[in-house]
Structures are given as structure tokens and as C-alpha cells.
Image: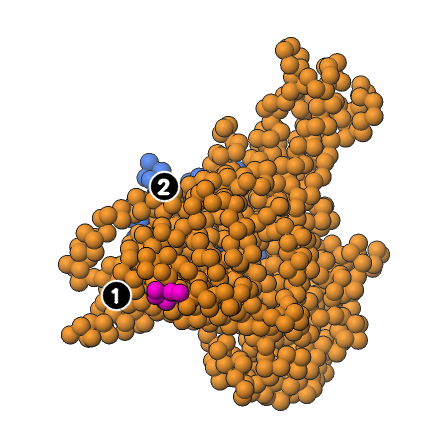
Chain colours: A blue, B orange
Amino acid sequence: MPTVSMTVNGQAVTGEVEGRTLLVQFLREQLSLTGTHVGCDTSQCGACVVHVDGESVKSCSMLALQADGAEVTTIEGLASNGSLHPMQEAFREHHGLQCGFCTPGMVMSAVDLLKKNPNPDEGEIREWLEGNICRCTGYHNIVKAIQSAAASMRG
Amino acid sequence: MTDTGIGASVKRKEDFRFLTGEGRYTDDINRPGQLHAYFVRSPHAHAAVKSVNKADAEAAEGVVAVFTGADMAADNVGSLPCGWVVNDRHGEPHKAPPHFPLVRDKVRYVGDHVAVVIAKTYAAARQAAELVEVDYDELPAVAETGKARDGSAALLHEEAPGNLCYDWVLGDEAEADAAFAKAHHVTRVDLVNNRLIPNAMEPRAAIGEYDMGTDSYTLYSTSQNPHLLKLILCAFVLGLNENKLRVIAPDVGGGFGSKIFCYAEETVCTWAAKKVKAPVKWTAERTESFTSDAHGRDHITHAELAMDENGKFLGMKVDTTANMGAYLSSFSTSVPTYLYATLLAGQYTTPVIFANVKAVFTNTAPVDAYRGAGRPEATYVVERLVEVAAREMGLDPAEIRRRNFIQPDQFPYQTPVALQYDIGDYGASLDKALEMIDYDGFAGRRSASEAKGMLRGIGFSAYIEACGIAPSAVVGSLGAGVGLWESAQVRFNATGSVSVFTGAHSHGQGHETTFSQLVSDTLGVPIENVEIVHGDTGSIPMGMGTYGSRSLAVGGSAISRACDKIIEKSRKIAAHLMEASVDDVEFENGTFRVAGTDKEKSIAEVAFTAYVPHNYPEGVEPGLDETAFYDPLNFTYPSGVHICEVEIDPSTGVTEIVDWVAVDDFGKIINPMVVEGQVHGGIAQGVGQALLENCVYDGDSGQLLTGSYMDYCMPRADDLPSFRVGMTETPCTHNPLGVKGCGEAGAIAAPAATINAITNALGILSMDMPASPEKVWRLANQQKMAAE
């Protein structure tokens, strides 16, 4: 089986994978990083969003081998030294999560949005979230959380 | 109110783990030596299974075993039961054909379970499933609700002639006819309550495990009610003593009803774990969720409302056909009967109501409770009827409702459909909603829309629901096979922290926070010193789980009662410590005081004494650990008024919800932030049904045409508006907290409000859900063409 190496949440990792192994499977099954979730099999739901070389990516739609040499950040790598990332903090503050299953993908996707557009309006946030499905919140508080995070991250 | 007590929007305790990826859902759990299961499912809607050849699959690399229905039959594994017996109009129990976890003779829907392949890896099991040769003899299928009882329709079960599960009535038909005979006007509507697929974001999953040393099983499952699952599996399906099965429902990623039921897959994983002597794990692919989670709704209804010349309701008649799917899921029979027809009075004084419900079998996935369960269907009937009635009578839709509301001085109010509402103030919610939406300004907003070439509409939904499910004696008399009380155990630990064990299960509702607030407020201990334990039958007392907006009203009441017991015992210990009479000891904010003195003991000191009872009152047991079981006296009756305002682009048929006002009366509220979140999510699911979601089976082949997120339209962020939520409050009269429940309200209210708004904008009386752009465009342009 081929070997894949990458940096995940700042740690160098190496593993043997099948050609068909998806990045999300490598993260969940080999690295036990189970914060990245699988909610569908057609790459619609976005529960599996991680960052690959700084860009948000659905890790169900990428082979582990395609991430060879990449810098990968998962939800487990977002908080630093036990303090939440401003986006995580904003989701908590504004009740942007209920069951928590879509949350890791939602947060990772939102972090990338603010990198690309530090001051999105409500419509831009809603449009960006097209690729992340939440069944619990009706998105209302997710949108509020992202607006609040944007304000706090702009300083 | 403290900043963490009852009434405070405390930030959720569970969020840190969910936000950092440390949540622990069933699929995150892996057991040593675990094998993986993959189900061979029927590709046909209806077929006889002539033979299953598993030899090639068994020989495939990595495969440990392949099992069929015959293997389960050999072990006397039973049928998955339906736990609610509905007696038909002749007093006969509903038809209950067997529902085996793996089929024995026929498949009856696409996705039905034919065999299971168990292998060392998931990939090996999935690949080998392709090698299981099933010889099917295809049979004609019937997938459409309205066609199930046609004489020529395929018959699913010999036990149910005409595919009829039951023909059930509520109310007096002759009285209803007499009321209609006196009517000045009768409004008639024909409605389809479209079939939905629940789609919790976490797919169902299960790990069955068998311990040879103790001859006992453990099942990890995505369940809303682990004790109920354990009870059903042990007593009805696997024939185990209940002390031999532990069910653990860890973090669960949404349920909405679909994770209440006892399913084939978790049954098979549990049973097979002993056969293969290893843990067996199964996680649904999303397509399996679409094909084999219990679906929701699926009613066809004709309803009539009789009125006098002032628009006062005289009587209502409702005729509904409800689709049960191919088999009866765990509580399916109760949904279109006792959770539906009993709600047809709505918020109104309609004196006579007659309902007839025919439940039918079809070659589709089983249908059972989905967020609201019967009550959204009832509200849709009532609020569509009332809206159409207003238009036909030339009455303002707010006014016709107001004329017919049950008035605050009429409570307790006995409806003609069995329920007795304890309290409410429907006019207060309507007034507040009208003010919030600026109803007086609507005409101006409509003109402004027209000036842009857009159509604007406004729609009301004044809903009621029966929640806090449910008084055991009442549901027992109606056929429920279980009691619907809830349990709580409140344990002071020796050093002053508190562990609470609840039978309710949180899968997004925030119980760890709300219940902690309740306990912190009641016992006067800091909220961070309270832990809520749920979801493990090995550590919690027998409990009934979470559904029917019951967790706080029933489970919270049990916690409240257990806290009361803690305080009473502590009072005796405190009295002893302070050398006072028990009657002189007061308790407030976590401190016992002797009235009129400066003597005091904190409850933490008392707890320590209870566990280190060196100086202790005679006749009092050591320890501070109390259990309470709470059986509600009545249902609770949350109610409210939602108003939806839409703008439709007639050139594209796209409907935009431009404003949404929800005014709800949930009684007392523990955590407003959590309650508002529940309302938002409920509305989103109701709007999803009204605008986007629709489960479609091909009428001829019975193939599921909406089997993935590419075909089944889930609400996305850009399909929905922000919501404006207001509250009114009439505290529930019969539980210790005055709470009613809030989890289902949005999903109950929203479909009628949305369709009422769209039909208002289009100037028509009725249309079916979902109001897709294509459908709306056709209606908009038909109107335009007719006008020209």
C-alpha cells in the first residue's frame, strides 16, 4: 500500500493507505481525529470540511494521497492552548450549534469565509454556507455567530 | 434570577466538546476486534425472495459471516413490534403483520433488509455484499398513498386485506352532520401532507457487542431513548433478560423522531455479535438513511368546516388516508390518530368534530413520528381550512381566528376530540404577532412589492400542540404499550458536586445546560458543579427518552421532584447539625438556616455529613441520593401564532420569505437562548416541508427517486430568512415547573403559515406543498393569463 505523509494540526504524520482511501477516512480511522464527520456520501453536507493548505476542502471529496505533503488543519487543531478560536467562541456565544454534528465543518468553512471576505453581509454568509447543511439551527444563529466573529476578528 | 439560574440564557455546557471536535458520536467509537456490517438491501419495491445464495460472499476475502432471515429465524429472533395498538371503528385492533429484521419471504420496499455481510473491514463487507445472489420474483408494487386501497393494488400482507391497517374514527358523525345541516357556509379543502425524510445530520449507527464471560450484550446506538430500545429488543425481539443488555446512546447528532424507533440494523448488530464473537459495527451511508430511516407525514386529507353567517365555526369533518409504509414502525399507528385527530380543535371552540383516518400499507419505507408527529398534519388541516374559510367569507384572517378562539376564561377547556387544554391565551399571542409583523402596514408593503412587479402575501398559523408526552393512564387507555413517565436521580457527591441521571436524552436540545440550570437554581449549587448524565442504561434509572417535546415538562419535573426529596432529607440533617427543630429550618440559595438565628449550614456541608455521618440524626440513612419518577397529569399545550410574509417573483416563481414572526407560549422558560434556537430549527424544518422537501417514490416501480441530497432538497442557509421570535406566557398548571415544551412548535406552525402566505400572494385558495418555483411560477402565470 502506498505511504502518505502530511502535516496535520502541526504534527508530521505518515500512514499507509489504499489508493481509494479518502482524506476523511485517513483522518478519522488512522489518526483518530473523529471531530471531522461524515454526513453524506455525495459531498453535499459539508460535515467533513477541513483546511488543506489553508483552503476549506470537503475531506470526503479528496483522496488521502492527494493530500500528500499538505498542511491539514482539522477542527481539533483550531483552538490553541485550550482557548477557543474566535469563530468557535462566537458559535458558543450565539448558540450556533445544537446537536454538534455539522458544527466542525460549519466552523472550518466559516473560518475560510472570513479569510476570503473579512466583512461579509448576511446574504454573502448565507450564500457561502450553501455547501454546509445544518438540520438543527435553521442557520439563524450560525449566521449571527459568523457576523459576530467577523466583527471581533477585524478587531 | 441568578445569571445561571432559571430564566437565564446560559451558554451551553456541551458546546466546548462539540466545537473542538471532542464530541463522541457512535461512529467515533471503535471497539477492540470490531467487525463491520453491510446490509444487502432490496433493489425492488415488492418481490418474493425465492433463494439467497451466500456462498461466494462467504468465501470473499475478509468476510467472517453472511446471515439471512433464515439464520435469525433459527435463533427465534422475533418481529420488530409496533408499540401502540389502535382499535378501529369496530373495536378491532389494527392489522399488525410481522416485521422481521431480515426478511423471510418477501421484500416490501426498496431498501428492505435481505442479508447482512460481516467482514473485517467496511470495504470488504460492502464489496462482498455484491456477491450475495438473491433470486427475486418481482411483484407489482403500490407506492402511492391514494392508490393503496384500489381493488387492483398489489397486496403487501396477507394479514391486511385491501392494504388497510385500520379504519379509525374519532367523534360523532351524526352530530357533525347535524351541525353541517345548519351551516351558513361550508369550506372544503383537499390537502396533501407531503412525505418527508427526517435527515438528522448524523446517520444512524450501531455497534453490537457480546461478552462471553458474563453472557451479556452492549449496544451503542444513535437512539433518542436507550431504555425503550433496550426494552423492545429484550422483551420482544431478542428474547433476552433486560439485565443482559446495556444500551449506550452517546452523543447523538439530531433525531427529530427518526431515532426513537427500534430498527433492523441495530437488532442485527446485537444478535450477530454473539454469532461472530466480536463487536459488529454498522454506520448508515446517507443513501441508507434515505431508504431505511422511518419517514414522516404522508397524508391525503379532505376536510370541511361549517360556519354560521358570522364565520363562527359550527363543525368540522376530516377524512384522512395515512401511509404507514411497508411495515409498522415502533409508534407509527399512534401518529395519524391520537397525535393527529385529537388536535383538530386547534385554538378554536369548534363544538363538533368528526375524523376518520384510514391507515394503509404501501411498498415504501415505514412512516413514523417526525418532528411534531401528527400535530403538524393537524395544524396544517385546521389552519388551511380557517384561512380558506376567511377568504371565502370575506373576513380578515386575523379576525376569523379571533372570533373563534377559546377565551382565557374558558380554561380548563374540554375539546370535542378528547383533550382537555389546561391554559392558554391565544388572543395575546395573536396581538403580539400582529404588532411585531406590523400588520397594519402590510397593505403598503404589498403595494411597494407590486410596484416592483413582485407578489406579496401574508399567512397565519395559530397552532396548538399536545406535548409533555404523556400521562401514562391516558395513553394506556388509548392503546400505548408503555408508560410515558420520566425518571431522574439526583446524587450529591460527598464533596458537594451533584450528578444528575436522567432518562431524557439530549441530541441537540441542550439538556446538559438547561437541566443544570434547574438543579443549580433549586439546590443552590454552582452550575459548574452539576453534571447531567444521560444515554446509558448501565448508569441511569429506567427512563423513557426524548420525543414529543417532553424532556423538560416530564423529565425536568422528575428532576425537580428528586431535588425536593434531596432538600427534605438535607433539612433533617441540617436541623441535627444546628441542634434545631426540622420545622424551624429554612432553605434558600443552597443554605439551611434556623429561622430567627444566625445558625446556618450550606447544602454542601450537609452532603458531606451525609457521607461522613459521624454526627448524624437517628433514623436517617446515610448518603444523599434521591430518585423520582414523574408521571404527568395531563399533556401540556404549547400554542402560538406564526406569521409569514413572502415575496414572489412571478417571472421565476421563486418565493422569498421576507419576514417571519413567531410568538409562542411555552409557559415558563428555563433558558430563552435554547428555546429560541429550538423555534428557529423547527421553523426551518416546517419551511423546508412547505417550500423544498418532498420524498418521491415512482408510482409504478416503487423506486425512491429522492434518495440523496442531490434529489431531496434540504433547506440551505440561503433558502431561509432570519426569524423574529417573541413569547407570551401562561404557565402550565399541572407540572411543578410550569413548562410546556418547545421542540416541535416551529415545525408544527410553519407549513400552514408558509402556504397561507404564498396562496395569499397568488390570490388563490390552495396549492400543495412543496411550493417549488416551478409550481409557483405556473400558478402565478395562470392567474395572470386568466386576468388577461
The quarter of the picture where the C terminus of chain B appears is bottom left
* Label of residue A148 in the image: 2
Task: Give the residue pinned by disc 1.
Answer: B763
Horizontally, is B756 left or right of B293 in the view? left
Q: What residue lies at 50% left-to-right and 76% top-to-bottom?
A: B145
Task: Where is residue B707? Give x, y as percent.
Answer: 49, 72
Q: What residue lies at 63% left-to-right and 72% top-to-bottom?
A: B90
Task: Where is residue B22? Give x, y as percent.
Answer: 57, 47
Whether residue B61 appears in this view of the structure is no
Q: What residue lies at 46% left-to-right and 72% top-to-bottom?
A: B300
Task: Where is residue B12? Give x, y as percent.
Answer: 51, 40
Separation (CA) of disc 1 from disc 2 = 40 Å
Q: Chain of mark 1?
A: B
Check disc 2: other Cα within 10 Å, few if <14, some if 14-19, many if 20+.
some
Residue B185 colored magenta? yes
Q: Nearer the viewer, mark 1 or mark 2?
A: 1
State the residue lying farthest toward the right. Answer: B213
Task: Where is residue B87? Give x, y as percent.
Answer: 64, 68
* Label of residue A68 in the image: none
Dividing the picture into quadrants, the one containing residue B391 is bottom left
State the residue lying farthest toward the top. Answer: B597
Above or below, B497 relative to B56 = above
Q: What amino acid type should be assigned to the residue bearing mark 1?
A: Gly
For the image, the number of numbered tags is 2
Identify the secondary structure beneath mark 2.
helix
Check disc 1: other Cα within 10 Å, few if <14, some if 14-19, many if 20+.
some
Magenta segment: B182-187
